[in-house]
Image (spheres, rainbow, N blue to C red):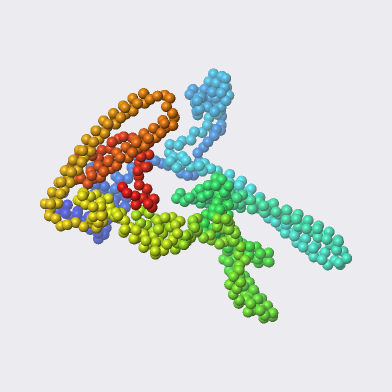
């Protein structure tokens, strides 16, 4: 093993300068042993050959596939032999051959011959011939899967010969058809020269000629039908066309779009064919809108919209021109067909204008054509529109107006505004008279003044908040009622120092605590009294006579019920007062369980007492009731 020679500093510097010069292109690139240039931008670790390669000059041969590792692939023209080997067949069994048929090219498990009762191994008779075994070791991946491999080109000659026979037969039939048509025309011309006395004979001859024409057309009509059949069955690349329905299924819908069958879920609406994904009728016909304004109006509308009518018009013009003798075909020469159609339209419009002008010059009446339309003159129109009972358009092109199902701008009771145009104290009313009673009679400005005066003359200020009333009550508990309302409504208070305000706050808190303690003591006393009363009632009920009248019992039960309801009402009032006092206290001064719920279910008697005692805001006289 030879060691590499160490390079000096100058040699390394020179190599770097040469490498930079090659990258700049001022010096030619290095050349390998085969005469090919080496890219100077290739990294050094790729360009340098290993030490065991023993290369004295720059090369990239060590980066390429070596010759001993290359595969010699078969060419595409190589023909693989298949089938039975022709020649002499063995007459006795050979060692290693198939035990069933005696062939050397396969084993018994791979044999495709009929299984014999006694195989060729034991009989030594009817030895099968050997077969060619193709060698696929040298074929590539694509070569193994080439479906045209070993294809004999001579087989395609049969197809070409058959096609040529069909073409020759078509030309022969076409020539025969033209010959018969020429004969029929000559015969028809001779018959026209006959005198008018032989009209009946001429009619018979014409019928015979028509029969001959039909026969001539039938002779060549079969080929025409076959050509049309082949043309219809031909599909465009990337599409699948159903020739019976003339619907293409190539264009699938976008996933974000709404499916056709989801536009109208009515079972009697347009039919949807899931196999062809077609819906010919309009699924949104019940809306009464024009088909152009709908997002989807059926496949039939799509087929006859856009440029389809224009193409159909061009096709019809081409057919009519061909009948007149013009050599025109819309598919063979579309540019010529377009130009001729434009010229035809211009000539047709000029002819109509000239005809109209000549009629007007001859008969007059041009002033009647310049008259305004009949709709403006007579305020009438022949446009028919049919409406349903709900105002929806059933027939006609008029767009239905969007109307509300409720009556609008209807003023009842002499009001000039609608109900709900005024809002005060949580109630709706009329803005014209400030009345909050529905279906009331309008009083106008006088009603507004009366309502304002009645609110100002009330003994209590109902505009004040409950917190303001409680604050005024705590500040002056002995003050008269008029003074309380005045202070609560106006919010007037004397100027006091901070020390006085603090002392008053402490006094209020102490009073609240005393009131709460007294209330809890009163509760305990009342509970004891209730228990005693219940015991006495039970004893009285036990000792009561069984012969008492039913009326007396019902009266006593009603009185007891009223008494219980009154007790519940009083208890609820007291509880509300305690809650108001607790709300006015400072949070740090409140008892620990003051906000805790009792957790007691509400009984029917308590609900009845609540209904009796609650204040009804809808009652106009409720505000005048005394507490």
Tell me residue 204's x, y (percent): 83, 59
In which quadrant of the rendered view does residue 316 lie? bottom right
Closest to the observer, 555 or 534: 555
- Front residue of 280 and 627: 627
Q: Quadrant of the N terminus?
A: top left
Q: Position of residue 120 (x, y in %)?
A: 55, 21
Residue 279 in the figure: left or right of residue 471: right
Q: Position of residue 285 (x, y in %)?
A: 56, 54
Residue nearest the viewer, comparing 177 with 106: 177
In the image, residue 307 sits, relative to residue 264, either above or below, namely: below
- The residue at the point 34 percent across, 58 percent down is 454
Q: Is residue 125 left or right of residue 472?
A: right
Who's the residue at 59% across and 75% down the image?
A: 372
Residue 238 visible in the shown view:
no
Tell me the quarter of the picture where residue 123 sits: top right
* Position of residue 288 in the picture relative to residue 41 (left or right): right
From the top left corner, tell me how far across and down residue 307 is, in percent. Answer: 55, 61
Question: Residue at coordinates 35% horizontally, 43% vertically from top-left?
Answer: 613
Q: Is residue 435 visible?
A: yes
> In the drawing, does residue 207 fall left or right of residue 169?
right
The structure residue drawn at horizontal position 73% and vertical position 53%, both measured from the top left corner, is 218
* Residue at the extreme right: 197
Q: Is residue 534 above or below residue 363?
A: above
């Amino acid at each position: 093993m030879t060691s590499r020679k160490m390079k000096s500093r100058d040699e390394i510097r020179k190599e770097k300068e040469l490498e930079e010069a090659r990258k700049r292109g001022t010096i030619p690139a290095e050349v390998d042993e085969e005469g090919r240039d080496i890219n100077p931008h290739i990294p050094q670790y790729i360009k340098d050959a290993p030490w065991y390669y023993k290369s004295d000059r720059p090369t990239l041969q060590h980066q390429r596939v070596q010759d001993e590792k290359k595969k010699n692939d078969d060419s595409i023209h190589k023909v693989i032999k298949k089938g039975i080997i022709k020649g002499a067949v063995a007459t006795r069994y050979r060692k290693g051959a198939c035990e069933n048929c005696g062939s050397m090219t396969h084993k018994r498990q791979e044999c495709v011959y009929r299984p014999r009762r006694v195989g060729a191994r034991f009989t030594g008779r009817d030895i099968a011939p050997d077969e060619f075994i193709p060698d696929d070791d040298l074929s590539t991946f694509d070569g193994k899967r080439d479906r045209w491999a070993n294809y004999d080109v001579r087989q395609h000659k049969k197809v070409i010969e058959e096609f040529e026979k069909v073409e020759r037969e078509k030309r022969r039939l076409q020539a025969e058809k033209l010959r018969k048509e020429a004969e029929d025309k000559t015969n028809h011309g001779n018959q026209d020269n006959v005198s008018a006395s032989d009209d009946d004979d001429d009619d018979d001859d014409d019928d015979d000629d028509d029969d001959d024409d039909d026969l001539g057309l039938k002779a060549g009509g079969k080929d025409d039908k076959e050509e049309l059949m082949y043309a219809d069955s031909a599909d465009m690349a990337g599409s699948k066309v159903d020739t019976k329905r003339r619907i293409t299924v190539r264009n699938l819908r976008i996933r974000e779009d709404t499916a056709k069958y989801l536009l109208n879920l009515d079972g009697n609406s347009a039919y949807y064919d899931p196999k062809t994904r077609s819906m010919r009728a309009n699924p949104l016909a019940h809306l009464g809108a024009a088909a152009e304004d709908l997002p989807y109006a059926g496949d039939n509308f799509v087929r006859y919209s856009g440029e389809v009518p224009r193409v159909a018009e061009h096709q019809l013009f081409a057919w009519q021109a061909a009948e007149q003798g013009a050599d025109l075909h819309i598919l063979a020469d579309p540019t010529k067909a377009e130009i001729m159609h434009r010229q035809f339209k211009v000539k047709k419009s000029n002819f109509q204008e000239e005809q109209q002008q000549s009629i007007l010059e001859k008969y007059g009446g041009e002033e009647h054509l310049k008259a305004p339309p009949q709709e403006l003159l007579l305020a009438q129109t022949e446009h028919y529109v049919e409406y349903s009972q709900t105002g929806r358009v059933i027939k006609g092109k008029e767009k239905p107006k969007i109307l509300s199902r409720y009556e609008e701008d209807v003023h009842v009771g002499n009001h000039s505004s609608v109900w709900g145009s005024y809002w005060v104290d949580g109630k709706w009313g009329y803005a014209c008279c400030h009345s909050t009673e529905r279906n009331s009679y309008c009083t106008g400005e006088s009603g507004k003044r009366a309502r304002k005066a009645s609110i100002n003359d009330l003994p209590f200020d109902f505009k004040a908040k409950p917190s303001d009333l409680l604050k005024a009550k705590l500040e002056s508990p002995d003050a008269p009622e008029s003074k309380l309302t005045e202070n609560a409504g106006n919010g007037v208070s004397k100027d006091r120092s901070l020390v006085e305000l603090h002392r008053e706050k402490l006094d209020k808190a102490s009073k609240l605590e005393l009131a709460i303690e007294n209330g809890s003591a009163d509760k305990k006393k009342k509970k004891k009294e209730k228990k005693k009363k219940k015991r006495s009632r039970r004893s009285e009920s036990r000792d009561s006579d069984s012969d008492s009248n039913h009326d007396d019992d019902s009266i006593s039960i009603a009185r007891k019920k009223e008494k219980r309801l009154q007790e519940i009402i009083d208890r609820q009032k007291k509880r509300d007062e305690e809650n108001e006092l607790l709300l006015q206290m400072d949070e740090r001064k409140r008892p620990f369980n003051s906000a805790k719920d009792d957790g007691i279910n509400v009984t029917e008697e308590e609900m009845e007492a609540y209904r009796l005692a609650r204040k009804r805001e809808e009652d106009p006289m409720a505000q005048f009731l005394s507490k």
